[in-house]
Amino acid sequence: MRGSWAAAAAMLTLALGAALVVTTSPGRPPGTDSATGGPPPMGWSSWSFLRHHPTAASIEAEARAMKSSGLASYGYRYVNVDDFWMACDGTGPEVDSFGRWIPDRAAFPAGIAAVASRVHAEGLKFGLYVTPGIPENAVRRNTAIEGTSFTASQIANTSVTEVNYNCGHMYGINYAVAGAQDYIDSWADEFASWGVDYVKLDGVGTWDIPDIEAWSVGLRRTGRKILLDLSNTLAISDAARWAQLADGWRTSGDIECYSCETDGSSYPLTDWAHVASRFDAVARWQPYGGPAGWNDEDSLEVGNGADDGLTVPERQTMMSLWSLGSSPLILGTNLTDLTPADKAMLENRAVIAVDQDGIAARRLIDGASEQVFAKRQPDGIWYIGVFNTDPSARRTFRVSLAQLGLSQAIRITDLWTGRSLDVVSGSYTITIAPGGVSLISARPLPGTGETASWPVPAGP
């Protein structure tokens, strides 16, 4: 819906007259944070900053920085190795005797388990990356499938090429034949033995549902609590299926601005256009995020100042939008070089609480330069984000309480500053910096009531 507040108010009055239902789909069986009602995961991933060059030393340095910086005490606990950890030759990923990827020996000389152990020693969790299918090298060698009499060539579908962004040369798997699930189980068991707590399954879509099902089953069978996150740009038409199979699913493409990078570095990490594209994604996927699993908006690029590729207000917008959507807060920045201002943003407990409540906010206004998202807590407190999507000019917005289904007076607190904005009734007016946000909590005063029936989710 685009247009003025007046037009929006008319439409929203009708919409709010009906019950507003938060849709959730059956989650994965017990054994994951989301299925047991835990909050969206928080942590760090190697892709945005380290990109093609993760090493044991660099991953361990980021883990130490997460602990020493104090971020871990605010809930950031996952340290995830993305792509390029595996060894490749001219025919794809190199494999062990059971047809599974092996680590790049130069980058991870002591193996992945040693890195996971050092991450765990910091009191943190460890994540790892994989793509669907079976390596061509496994089929060429016809490797055994661990614990069975089956072999790679018996389960491979060589007429199908699976996505692999690094080595390529991944064949499909025929899950209709014996040994296919055993192969994925063996890989999941290996990950569990290495100490993996989080798996990113990349390059998957609706066509890969059998692979996703196999990994979901395999990870559960390990008996280890391992989160499963799907990437990227998953189909919303299959949102209920993703919620059954995984703990998170990427709603969009990569947040990184690859065309912005200079001098061979990964900086700047993103830009305003990539962040602004998430407004529609957060709104469209809202019905599917919650305790059954999380709408994943990709890495949070806050931490390195100007190298983030965003102004200070734009960084606040990014973290506010991710938090209103209850997306995982997985940092893509360099934790060993945090700027004080960005670190303070990441440590804002009030904003983190907006994310960790596990409730995906609804979009109420979709204007030419204005976005408004809101969500209601079980205790009656509201979180409201008003965004100025014009990156070049300050703008003033009048926020009508009636559009939120609120009547009479509310007490407002600015969540970024902690400052009380007084008691207001009817509406309030806010001036917002270019690309910036006003993120507030609003508490209805006793006896003022609400004018519409918003659902009270069970919460995380």
Image: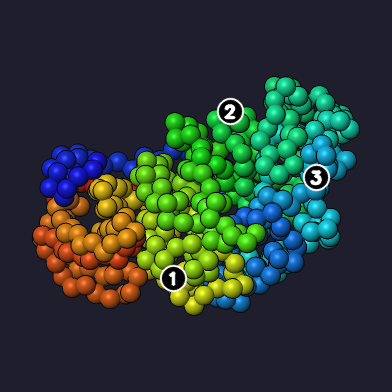
Residue ID at (38%, 56%): 321
The C terminus sits in image quarter: bottom left
Image coords of residue 99 (percent x, y): 82, 38
What is the C-alpha distance between the residues marked 3 and 2?
Answer: 25 Å
Earlier residue among tags 2 and 1: 2
Q: Quadrant of residue 389?
A: bottom left
Q: In this orientation, which residue lies closer to the viewer: 139 or 405?
A: 139
Earlier residue among tags 3 and 1: 3
Left or right of 357, for residue 204: right
Residue 211 to residue 122: above or below: above
Earlier residue among tags 3 and 2: 3
Residue underneath mark 3:
88
Q: In this orientation, which residue lies closer to the viewer: 378 or 196?
A: 196
Q: In this orientation, which residue lies closer to the viewer: 315 or 182?
A: 315
Residue underneath mark 1:
345
Left or right of 423, for residue 181: right
What is the C-alpha distance between the residues marked 2 and 1?
Answer: 39 Å
For mark 3, does the 10 Å Cα neighbourhood hold few (<14), some (14 to 19), or many (20 or more) residues?
Answer: many
Residue underneath mark 2:
207
Residue ID at (16%, 50%): 5
Q: Check disc 2 and give the amino acid type.
A: Trp
Residue ID at (49%, 48%): 296
Image coords of residue 427 (percent x, y): 13, 60
